[in-house]
Amino acid sequence: MKGLRAFLPLLVLIAVGIALLASGALERFSPQHIAQEQADLQASIALHPLLAALTQIGLMAMSIATGIPGAIVIVLAGGMLFGIVTGTILSSIGTTIGALILFLASRSAFQHGTRQVPALVERLRSGYHAHPVSYALFLRLVPFFPFGGVTVALAWLRCPLWLFALATATGGTVMVAFETALGAGLTQAIARDGAFSMSIFAHKHVLLPLLGMAVLALTPIVLSQLRRKK
């Protein structure tokens, strides 16, 4: 029973994530849908700025804590509705809160769970133990690694709470900033073209954030090549 109670928070998060995916709630935050209702949504934000900000933070926290795929659409929606600076701040706060919830739930479960090490943890173990601070920041900075998977892996590796929070709040914010800038760029491109289409990806406000995300994604490959040369 003690082991089951330890796993309960993690099981609840998984159940909530499955329910969110099954409900199709994330579809309401797709760029197409936001573009269609942008005027009404921004009017509501102007009338209730605090509630809107808390809603963005809460939605991000829930999506990250449950580990559901597609959390990026909420970040994009934040960029489209709040702009780059405010959207980045709100989404970063929500991301950090959600990651902490998932981290604590995972750490509680692993204290009483199986000793079998997941494949992702085994791949990250040597690098983390050699340089825990720099490696934790690196894992959060590079989008190549799944955000939820890294959170669970760091919990299994017994990463200190302060280090996890620092890595998430700093490294994670960089990626959130690029995604938020992409969302804001979509707003400008749609306003110029008058509709959402594939042609908007040719606009510099959309293309530059995508290039930045691509550079971050290529970081592990570049570092690997440099290490082999040494």
Image (spheres, rainbow, N blue to C red):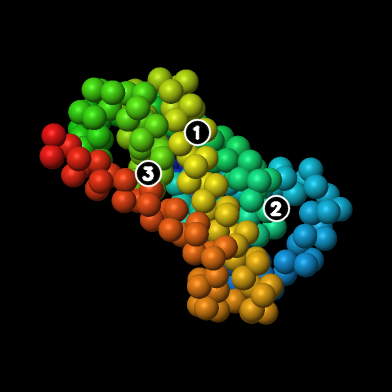
Question: Which residue is pictured at 13% across the width and 34% down the height?
Answer: 230
Q: Label 3 sits on what residue type?
A: Val
* Residue 14 visible in rendering: yes
Q: Label 2 sits on what residue type?
A: Phe
Residue carrying label 1: 170
Between 205 and 80, the one nearer to me in the picture: 205
Residue carrying label 2: 82
Give me the disc on residue 142.
Answer: 3
Splitting the image into 4 quarters, where does residue 88 fall? top right
Q: Is residue 100 left or right of residue 194?
A: left
Packing grade of label 2 (10 A; few <14, some 14-19, many >=20) is: many
User: Residue 1: x and y, percent?
Assistant: 38, 26
Q: Label 1 sits on what residue type?
A: Thr
First in sequence, mark 3 or 2: give its number. 2
Q: Is residue 134 left or right of residue 32?
A: left
Q: Please tell me whether mark 3 sits on a helix, a strand or a loop.
A: loop
Between 67 and 180, the one nearer to me in the picture: 180
Splitting the image into 4 quarters, where does residue 137 fall? top left
- The residue sitting at the right extreme is 47
Packing grade of label 1 (10 A; few <14, some 14-19, many >=20) is: some
